Amino acid sequence: MPFYHKLGKIPHKRHTVFKKPDGSLYYEQLFGTIGFDGMSTNMYHEQRPTQVKEIKGSYNARPKIAAEHNIKSYRFKGFHIKPEPDYLQSRKTVLTNSDVDIVLASPQQSTKDYFYKNSDSDELLFIHQGTGKLRTHLGNLDFKYGDYLVIPRGTIYKIDFDDEVNRLFIVESRRPIYTPKRYRNYFGQLLEHSPFCERDLRQPYELETNDENGEFLMKVKKQGQIYDMIYASHPFDVVGYDGYNYPYAFSIHDFEPITGRIHQPPPVHQTFETDAFVVCSFVPRLYDYHPDSIPAPYNHSNIDSDEVLYYVDGDFMSRNDIEKGHISLHPAGIPHGPHPGAVERSIGQTETEELAVMVDTFKPLQITEDAMEIADDSYHKSWLDH
Ligand SMILES: [Fe+2]
């Protein structure tokens, strides 16, 4: 997160004596990425964060691949992913490559019995349905429909849902997730032409500090394996921290669309970037205002990126027969474009209510067995007139 945040109590100087009321020391930990070169946070624990009591075992959470090589466009019916009680078990990877996993989940229950840490990936959770609270060792964030939650790798968290009906679209990224560099100045501040600014980004506000000993189960994801680790001290025991590396929230409803006299290209919708993929938000907006403009997109050849669109709400102007929770995959190597009739239908339209999240990956995506179960196998022929 490219701006400074401070929560709880911290000493005046880094790496100096910081005493508890009883005279003993708090334990400092640097929580950083990209070695010591990326963003980092300096935090202070009640107890040493290294007290592993037992490693109970592990299981393989890597998805099973159904199509390693693919040149076919697909539609996946995301809401056909079945709800499951447990948060981690409910997560189904549908598309994957060595940089990214694209995951659908419909968890029914909060994480009661364990803490979770993904040490492989930053996680981007898009909340399609549900409300609740993301609880982390660096503070808490409330979430609701339309929120992106950016959770840097290594963040220890639990997720509390208010009820059983929840739908999440998740991107797990082996590359750090940032806001687009072109929208930031030399100092990292978001510029005036950025479609959002720091005011729209919500920082953790509520630090849970527990000074407890016992047995605390933490499920740690590493190399696609989930390890059950028992810690001897409560993982949420931070009394304070400051720095740049922490989870944050951004609502898609706070994304200010960039519009023009003629069709604007997809990069105007960009919300996040990595060096392996981009994330874009398509939000309700006014259409192009040139008298002869065609609001529907032109056909385009995304020769070197796979395009994934997750449809959230509204009518998606360029597609026929698309519903909430559907995912379209338009693979690299072949052009795609509006469905038959969509260009003509768009002329003269003045606005759209569409809401969608797009992920364009620079490496091709593999299709998993879970995805094939919700796949529409005839979608690739949907551009034919008859
Ligand atoms: Fe496209």
Image (tube, helix red, strand yellow):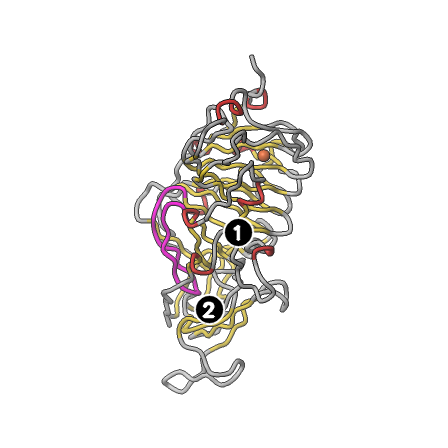
> Which numbered disc, 1 or 2, marks the residue that appears first in the sequence?
2
Stretch of the chain drawn in magenta:
128-147
Q: Nearer the viewer, residue 43 or 88?
A: 43
233 lies above or below 274: below
Residue type at mark 1: give it.
Ile
Percent from the top left, x then y, of residue 17?
49, 85
Q: Which label is found at residue 226?
A: 1
Q: Which label is found at residue 28?
A: none
Residue shown at the point (53%, 54%) measured from the top left: 193
Q: Secondary structure at mark 2?
A: strand
Cβ of mark 2 under 8 Å from ligand 1: the answer is no
Percent from the top left, x then y, of residue 138?
44, 65
- Taken as a whole, is the magenta stretch helix, strand or loop? strand
Callout in the foreground (1, 2)? 2
The residue positioned farthest toward the bottom in the image shown: 23
Q: Nearer the viewer, residue 31 or 262?
A: 262
Residue shown at the point (60%, 32%) measured from the top left: 330
Which quadrant of the render holds ligand 1?
top right
Residue shown at the point (55%, 27%) measured from the top left: 338
Identify the residue position indicated by label 2 in the image: 5
Inter-mark Cα distance, 1 to 2: 30 Å
Percent from the top left, x then y, of residue 100?
59, 46
Percent from the top left, x then y, of residue 223?
60, 52
Residue type at mark 2: give it.
His
Residue 118 drawn in magenta: no
Residue 134 drawn in magenta: yes
Compared across the picture, whether 211 is left or right of 66 comes to: left
